[in-house]
Amino acid sequence: MPAAGGFDKGTGKVYPGNLTPFVTVTCIVAAMGGLIFGYDIGISGGVTSMAPFLKKFFHSVYDKQQANKSTNQYCQYDSETLTLFTSSLYLAALLSSLVASTVTRKFGRKLSMLFGGVLFLAGGLINGFAQAVWMLILGRILLGFGIGFANQNKKCAV
């Protein structure tokens, strides 16, 4: 048996261990789940420190920053609404990853991943065109559902 290959106990076939285009594409698709999660974390972390964003959506946090420039760096964003905005994505991703396995079993991995992508796209559009905090939170929830579906299916694909 080759060192780089594998052995299928069910069929008795020996695999040479070559990197095929299918395996490469599968790995790239699997990596996308982590990519969109990391991208969203970076964007939300950066945007919540921008004064124009805080002034438009979280005015009380902005006012507090302007009134006290020597605020403790670790506690300058003291707002339950801002916390809800940030954590809604993570909670939605957790819940959807639990539900996604059932959806995947029922409809298949392709439709489940497509559904996750559509949810992520819808969340991105809502966040991009947001005019109120509730739109931001709804968009983040949809982004979280999309990430949860993509990451759950990534585990199934590999």
Image (cartoon, rainbow, N blue to C red):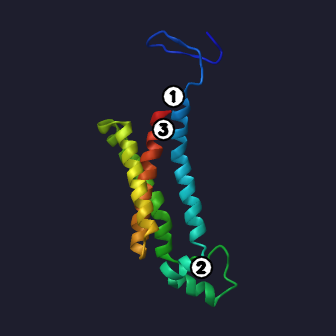
Placement of 7 over or under 101, stated as above or below: above
Label 1 secondary element: helix
Which amino acid does the dot numbered 2 rest on?
Ala
Mark closest to the chain's N terminus, 3 or 1: 1
Observer-nearest residue: 26 or 58? Answer: 26
Task: Judge whether residue 92 can be spotted in this image.
Answer: no
Residue shown at the point (50%, 66%) measured from the top left: 86
The answer to which image quadrant residue 152 occupies is top left
Pick the quarter of the image with the N terminus. Answer: top right
Q: Position of residue 37 (x, y in %)?
A: 53, 53
Residue shown at the point (59%, 79%) measured from the top left: 51
Q: Position of residue 81 (x, y in %)?
A: 46, 75
The answer to which image quadrant residue 127 occupies is bottom left
Label 3 secondary element: helix
Which amino acid does the dot numbered 1 rest on?
Phe
User: Total number of numbered labels?
Assistant: 3
Q: Which numbered tag is attached to residue 155?
A: 3
Q: Position of residue 87 (x, y in %)?
A: 48, 64
C-beta proximity under 8 Å, tags 2 and 3: no
Front tag of 1 and 2: 1
Placement of 154 over or under 132, stated as above or below: above
Front tag of 3 and 1: 1
Crowd tier of the residue under label 1, counting other residues whose Cα lies within 10 Å: few below 14, some 14–19, many 20 or above: few
Look at mark 1 in the image and give the residue it sits on.
22
Measure the C-alpha gap from mark 2 to mark 3: 38 Å
Residue shown at the point (42%, 63%) measured from the top left: 125
Look at mark 2 in the image and give the residue it sits on.
51
